[in-house]
Amino acid sequence: MLTSPATAALTRAPLAARPRTPAPAVHPVVRWAFYLFALSLPFEYPKRTIPWEVTTLTCAVFLLAALLQPRTSFARLPWAVRWFGLYLYVLLGAFVVDGGHYGDQVQKLFTLLLEAVLLLWVASNLLDYEDVAHGVLVSLGVACALRAVIQLAGIGTERIVEWTGGVRITALGQNENHIAMILSGGIIALLGLAYGRAHTTRWARALAWPVVGAIAVAIVQGGSRGGVLALGAGLLALTLGGASVATRLRNAVAVLVALGFLIWVSYQFVGTRNRFLQTAETGFMAGRERIYPTALRMVLEHPLTGWGPLNNMYELGNRLPEQHVPRRDTHNLALEVLTSTGLLGMVPFALGTWLCLRAAWRARRGVEGTTPFALLTVVLMVNMSGNWIATPLLWLTFAYALASGRQPTVAT
C-alpha cells in the first residue's frame, strides 16, 4: 500500500508531536446528574422513612447516568481507586474472619462504601473537565448556602440545651458535626472559586463574602468544635498557593478576615464558646477521651485483621458500659479502619488517601489552585474527631484532588 511522504512522516512522528483529538464534552445528562448529586450533599435527612439516604439515591442516579458516556466516565482507573478497592476486599475478609456478625448492617455499610469507591472512580474522570469542576463547586456552595438559610430562618430546627450553658442548633434532624463538615466544605468551595483557583473573577469575590458569613454562622450555631477547627485549617490551606506575591498577599488578607470573623462569631455563641472552654480547662471531649484509649487497646489486641466491620463498634460499646448504648463509634477515621480491618485494611486505605493528598498538593500550581488541598484538609481534619468514612463528600473530595493533580501547571 502506497503512502504519501506527509503521511509517512506523521506516522513516524512521536506521539506527543501528533495532532491531538479534542476530548469529548461531558454529556448534559451526566453533567446535570453530577450537579444534582452535589446539590443534595447538605440535605441528608436522618428522620426519613425510606431505608436509604437522599445522597445515596442521588449518587446512584449519577452513577447510572455515567453509563451513558462510559469512555469519558470510566476513562482511567487511578491507583487510589485500586487501593480503596483492595480495602473493600479486606473489609469483606475481616467480616468473614470475625465470624460474619451483624450481616445485615455490614451489607448496608459495604453497599455504601462500594458506591463511594465507584463515585471516586467516575468523579475523578469527569472533574478533569474544568467547566465540570467549576459547576460542582458552584453546586456545593449554593446548596450549603440554602441549607444555612433554612437553619438561620428557623425552618425545621432543633435546639439542644448544653449542660455547660447555651444551646446547639441544627436543622432537619442532622448531626451537628456532620453538617459542620459539609458546610465547611461549602465555604471552601465558595472561597476557592473567589480566591483559590487560577481563574477567578471580581463578581465571584464580591458574592462570596455575605454567603460565606451566613454559612459560618450556621456552623457555629451547631457547636461543633471539630468543624470550626477544621474550617480554620482549611482557610489557612487556601493561602499556600498563588501565581504571584500580590496574589498570595491578597489571599492571605482574605483568609485572615475570614478567620477573624469565625473566631468572633464562635465567641458570641454561648454554647460554642463554653464547649471550647470546657475542653481547654478539663480535657473533656464528649467521651472521646475514653473512646480513643479503649479503641487503641482493641487495635493492639487484634492488630492484623481487626474486630470486623460493625462488630468493632459493638465491642467498643461493651467496653464503655457507662455510655448505656449497645455500640459506640470510634469517632476517628483511622481508628475505625484499624479496629474494623486491622493493618491489612489500613495499609491500602492509607495508600489511597496518600495518593489523593499528594495530588491535591500538586494541584496548587494548576488550574484548581489551592482549593483541592484546602477542601481535603477540612474533610480529613473533621474525620480526626469523627468517623465519616461513608459520607459522599469525603469521596468526592478525594476525586477532586486526583483530577486536579493531573492538570498542567499554570504559567506564572
Image: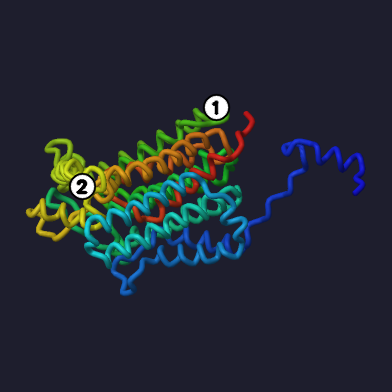
Quarter of the image with the C terminus is top right
**Point 49% across, 67% down: residue:** 61
Q: According to the image, label 2 marks what residue?
A: 270
Q: Position of residue 113 (x, y in %)?
A: 38, 57
Disc 1 marks a residue whose amino acid type is Ala
Residue 260, quarter of the rendered image: top left
Q: Is residue 32 left or right of residue 45?
A: right
The residue most toward the left is 322
- Disc 2 marks a residue whose amino acid type is Val
Percent across and percent down for residue 86 are 40, 50
Residue 185 pos. (x, y %): 41, 48
Q: Nearer the viewer, residue 395 or 372?
A: 395
Question: Residue 282 is drawn in which quadrant?
Answer: top left
Number of labels in the image equals: 2
Looking at the image, the residue that sits furthest to the bottom is 49
Which residue bears the numbered disc 1? 246
Q: Please identify the residue farthest to the front as the structure is shown.
A: 1
Give percent across and percent down for residue 169: 26, 57
Q: Is residue 2 left or right of residue 311?
A: right
Mark 2 Cα-neighbour bin, 10 Å: few <14, some 14–19, many ≥20:
some
Q: Please report the residue visible at 48 percent of the width from the left and 48 percent of the height from the top.
A: 399
Question: Against 361, is 119 above or below?
Answer: below
Side of 332 relative to 347 (left or right)? left
Depth check: 356 or 93 in front?
Answer: 93
Q: Is residue 218 visible?
A: no
Left or right side of 135 for 326: left
Q: Is residue 375 above or below residue 321?
A: above
Please name which of the two marks, 2 or 1, marks the residue nearer to the observer. 1
